Amino acid sequence: MGTQDLEYPLIGKTRKLECKNSKGRFDENFGRSEEAANEIEFEVASFGNGIGKCIGHFMWAIIRCKAVSYGRYPYARAMVVLLLVSVPLACIWANAGRIPVLLGQDPEIAAEAGSYARYMIPTIHAYGFLQCHIRFLQTQNIVLPMMFSVGITTLLHIFTCWILVLKSGLGNKGAALANALFLFIQLFSWITQLDC
């Protein structure tokens, strides 16, 4: 394995992060309340994700300690655990419109943030499953196909954001749907890399 092979995961991860943040470039065409709602939702979701990541990393440590081999079984258990962890996160995101109001935020902006967060709920499940597949494919050294699928889905994501945010008039909801669609396409493209 050359040093060039080690660069592929870094490139792919960077592209994925850029994809998640690209919807902000499309949101800037809307009003100030939509931008503020987007920022508030991001903070509420970041708090929820932080809790979920702590629990997820703890469960990964337990699963890795109990794993006898690098087989699929520990990752299947991790998917079940992450699915269970995603339930409280979904509850936090479902109430993302109420939390900022309790903290003194403008109700109109909080309602827009809550709407965006509710449309982002499907991404929680896709992201959890995607993390399991990333780790499994990396342990199997299936990195180059992962990089190509990230590149293709990045192009699809940009086009999807343009359609759902600007052309359809969905605004923030379209950005959330584009993120969910991106993660599910990424997940299914990586599932095809597995030998069943």
Image (spheres, grey):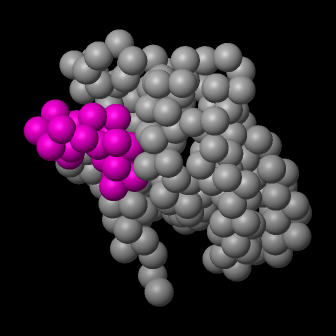
Q: Is residue 141 above or below residue 95?
A: below
Residue drawn at point x = 69 percent, y = 40 percent: 48
Residue drawn at point x = 88 percent, y = 70 percent: 66
The residue lying toward the viewer, choosing from 170 and 28, is: 170
Whole-percent x, y for residue 124 in the image:
56, 53
Residue drawn at point x = 40 percent, y = 36 percent: 20
- Give the image quarter of residue 65: bottom right
Whole-percent x, y for residue 74 in the image:
73, 72
Query: How many circles with numbers are drawn on the protein?
Result: 0
Which residue appears farthest toward the front when viewing the image?
Answer: 107
**Left or right: 112 as drawn, with respect to 97:** left
Q: Is residue 43 above or below residue 120?
A: above
Q: Examine the rendering and report whether any part of residue 103 can be seen.
A: yes
The residue lying toward the viewer, choosing from 2 and 61, is: 61
Asked whether 89 falls inside the magenta stretch, the response is no
Q: Examine the rendering and report whether any part of residue 18 can be seen.
A: no
Whole-percent x, y for residue 153 in the image:
27, 50
**Left or right: 161 as drawn, with respect to 22:** left
Residue drawn at point x = 44 percent, y = 39 percent: 116
- Give the image quarter of residue 131: bottom right
- Give the image quarter of residue 71: bottom right
Q: Main secondary structure of the magenta part?
A: helix
Residue span colored magenta:
159-182
